[in-house]
Each structure stands twice: as structure tokens, then as C-alpha cells.
Amino acid sequence: MSPFEIQLDLTPSIRNPQSGIGRTARFTFDALKRVAGEEMITAVARTGDLPRPRRVGRSILHSFEHKLPLTLGLTRVLTVHDLWTLKPNPFQPPEYQRSQGPRLKRAIHCADLIVTPSETVKQALLARFPEKKGRVHAVPHGYQLSPQTTAPPTPAVAHFLSDARPFILCIACLEVRKNLTPLLTALEHLPVRLALIGNLGFGGQEIEARLKAHPRRTHILHLTSAQDADLAALFQACTTYVQPSLDEGFGMPVIDALRFGKRPVLSEIPVFFEIAGGTADYFTPTDASQLTEVLKHNLAHTQDPKPSRTRAQSLTWDRVAHQLLSLYRPKRWPAALRETVPA
């Protein structure tokens, strides 16, 4: 019998498998099964508002959303992707913040261990919840795609790629936080096409309208979603990758861009410096003119030596699984928590 059982709440993967949280939950579950073995890892899903653990005692429940049960005899692990709901922000509907902010606070308070996707989020969380010191650990996500993908892209993407003219790639929902307006402005002044992958999000109606009325609309491929084969083909063929976000908890497409040997163009936000360091070009998120100039420079130097892929190649989901297994083990927990673990 396993020394303890690890139960992962895969509700996000069932409800929205292509979302960032949905993919994170699924990739983590698959990697843990590979590394720890099938008998130790169990999937659970919410039948109501909270995940229902299959068993308690020597069990760990890992939730990827702001919901944890108050079950006694169960060690609760929470992944906190970001802290946006804890303060007024323009990125989410006010009613969502009012409902989810208190949920996140409760989940953080009752979590025995907390996992964040970046040191940036970890430090922000500890600044707000200093009593959680020693129980918060940054475990960066892994990459999503492989340059060795051989599956063919869908017809729409294949048609776009049949044109040999250069293009830039951006994977971002049409929403306020993703900050696509400077990119669409820059595109008006650049001899390059755009492949944009993302569905409509909060406050994205203006971006959607601008996309439809863009003076270079025929040079834009916009897909609300894409299969892995499409994404791999687009990363392989693009001239560069752009992520103009105002804020992020991590940024998995940035890791994919680096893994495909691209030098991405990124907004100057702390988590992107943490992820990409000196292997990217940066711009002030609200400055479309600066983005235009940075893209011109980036596109003019495509023959320069490619950035090192070492960092991106090390960020695998199996590495995530090994780090999580180390954190799950009681010997790594604070003494106060170890004393509460059932024998």
C-alpha cells in the first residue's frame, strides 16, 4: 500500500480543458502518474461546490481552483495561480471579484501547503499572508508543446502557413488583461502578418471590433482555439512570438516560444523577466510606439543566434511532478503541520 494517496481535483480540466488552469491540472495529473505510479494518484471532481475527497487519513487533496474542503484528516494543497481577485482590478468583472475574492482568501487560510507557478506570485502572496511563510512554494509550470510534433495542422492553419510571408504569433484571449490594443496598433506599421489565438474574454468586445475593422484584416489569422498540432506548427514557422500582457501569473506560451528557439517580445512585467530573463526583448505594456520599434528590431535580426533553449527544456511537467512529490512528503512540511498528519 502507498504511504499516502494523492488526490487531484481535475474539475477545471473537465469543465474547460483548453484553459490555462485546465491544462495545468491535466498536465500535472499525467506527470504525477508517470513519475509516482498509477496506484498513488487519483483523480477527483467536484459534485457540488467543493471537491469531494475519495478518502481521508493518509491522503492529500490538491486543488487547482479557489475551493478546498474543510475535511478533517486530509492534507490540503492549493495552487494559487494569481491574486487578482483579492483587490479591485480592471481584468475581471466586479461581481466575479466579489464572489471569488473571499473564496480565494478562505482557500489560502485553510490550505496546508500552497503552490504558485512563479516566484513573483509567491512573494506577492507572502506579502499579503505572512503567516503562510514556510508553506508556500514556487513550482514553475512545464512547456506545453514539442518541436517534434508530427501531426498535421488543421486546414485553416495549413492555408495560413502556405503563405511564406513572415508572421508574428500571439496566444491571448481577447480581454483587458492581455492588452492586445498596442499589438494591433503596431501591426498597422509593420510589414508582417499576425496569427492570434484566443477567444473572447472580459472587456474584449472593443478588441474584437477592432480586429474585424483592422486595416490589415486580411493579414490576420484569428482562431478562438487551436489544437496542439496547430500551435506547434505556428510556433515552428513564426518569425517571433509576442505577449503584451498587463499582468500574468506565469505565461506558458512564453516557455513554448523559447523551446521553439524564438526570441519573444514581451511586456515589462516581473513574471516575464523571471521566466525569460535576457532571452527576450521587452517593451512598456502601454506604449504601442515602443512595441512597434522593438518588433522592427526583432524582425530585422531573425538571423542572429537563437536564444538558449536550456531554461525552457528544463521546465518539463515531469520536473513539476518530482518537485510536487517532494513537497507532498511530510518530512518537507513545517513541524507544526507534520504533527497533524495521521500516522
Image (cartoon, rainbow, N blue to C red):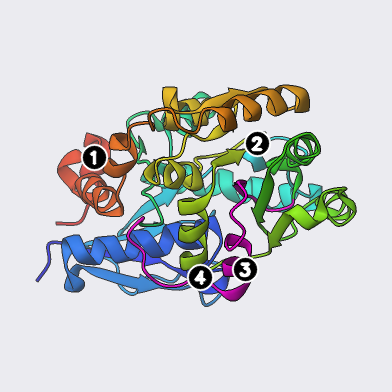
Q: Dot 3 corresponds to which residue?
A: 159
How far across and down, in percent of the image, does residue 165 sit? 62, 50
Between disc 2 and disc 3, whose residue precedes?
3
- Of the residues tagged 4 and 2, which is closer to the observer? 4
- What is the spatial separation of the Cα atoms under label 1 and label 2, in whole angstroms? 38 Å
Who is closer to the viewer here, 22 or 51? 22
Whole-Å distance between the Cαs marked 4 and 2?
A: 26 Å
Residue contact at pointers 1 and 4, CB within 8 angstroms: no
Residue at point 75% right, 59% down?
200
Between marks 3 and 4 in the image, the one whose residue lies nearer the viewer: 3
Name the image quarter holding the C terminus: bottom left
Three-letter code, disc 1:
Trp
Q: Which residue is mark 4?
A: 153
Residue 244 marker: 2
Q: Which residue is mark 1?
A: 333
Q: List the single residue furthest toward the front.
A: 164
Answer yes or no: do the residues labelled 4 and 2 have beta carbons within 8 Å? no
